[in-house]
Image: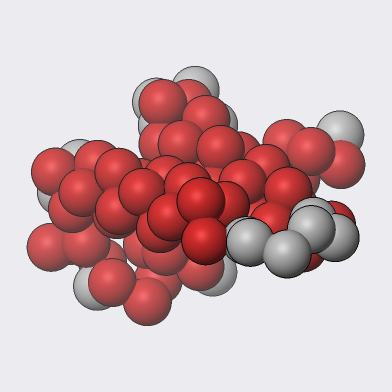
C-alpha cells in the first residue's frame, strides 16, 4: 500500500516529524541529572506535530494509525536519504 504522505505536499509535516526525532535524540543522549526540560521539549514537539497532522485532514481520511506511521516512515526516509 502506498504512503498517505506525499513528500512534496506534506513537507511541513515531515519537518515537524524531524523536530520530534531530534528532540527525542537529545533526550536519549542526555546524561545529566534533570531531563525534565528535554522531556517537555519532546512533548511539545509531538503535540505540535499531532495537531498539524490532524489539521491536514489525513487523520480523518486515513485514520490516526496510518497517517502517523506513514509520517514516521517519511521522516525516517528523509534522515536516511
Query: Which residue is painted at 37% across and 76% down in the image?
Result: 65
Picture quadrant of residue 32: bottom right
Task: Give the quadrant of residue 78.
Answer: top right
- Residue 39 horizontal/vertical position (percent): 52, 60
Residue 57 as seen in the image, left or right of residue 2:
left
Q: Is residue 47 left or right of residue 32?
A: left
Image position of 3 with respect to 19: above or below: below
Colour scheme employed for the rendering of this structure: secondary structure
Residue situated in front as seen by the camera: 7 or 17? 17
Residue 68: x and y, percent?
42, 64
Residue at 52% across, 30% down: 15
Q: Nearer the viewer, residue 41 or 50?
A: 41
> Who is closer to the viewer here, 4 or 19?
19
Q: Position of residue 50 (x, y in %)?
A: 29, 54
Residue under the point 30% across and 53% down = 47
- Visible in this render: residue 73? no
Is residue 16 placed above or below 76 in the rendered structure? above
Q: Position of residue 24 (x, y in %)?
A: 65, 56
Give the tally of numbered discs.
0
Residue 80 seen from this side: yes
Judging depth in this view, the residue of 4 and 36 nearest the camera is 36
Q: Quadrant of the N terminus?
A: bottom right
Residue visible at 36% across and 49% down in the picture = 44
- Where's the C terminus, which quadrant? top right
Amino acid at each position: 500500500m502506498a504512503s498517505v504522505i506525499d513528500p512534496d505536499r506534506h513537507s511541513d509535516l515531515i519537518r515537524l516529524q524531524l523536530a520530534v526525532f531530534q528532540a527525542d535524540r537529545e533526550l536519549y543522549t542526555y546524561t545529566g541529572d534533570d531531563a525534565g526540560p528535554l522531556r517537555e521539549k519532546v512533548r511539545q514537539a509531538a503535540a505540535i506535530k499531532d495537531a498539524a497532522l490532524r489539521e491536514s485532514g489525513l487523520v480523518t481520511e486515513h485514520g490516526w494509525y496510518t497517517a502517523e506511521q506513514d509520517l514516521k516512515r517519511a521522516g525516517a526516509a528523509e534522515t536516511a536519504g
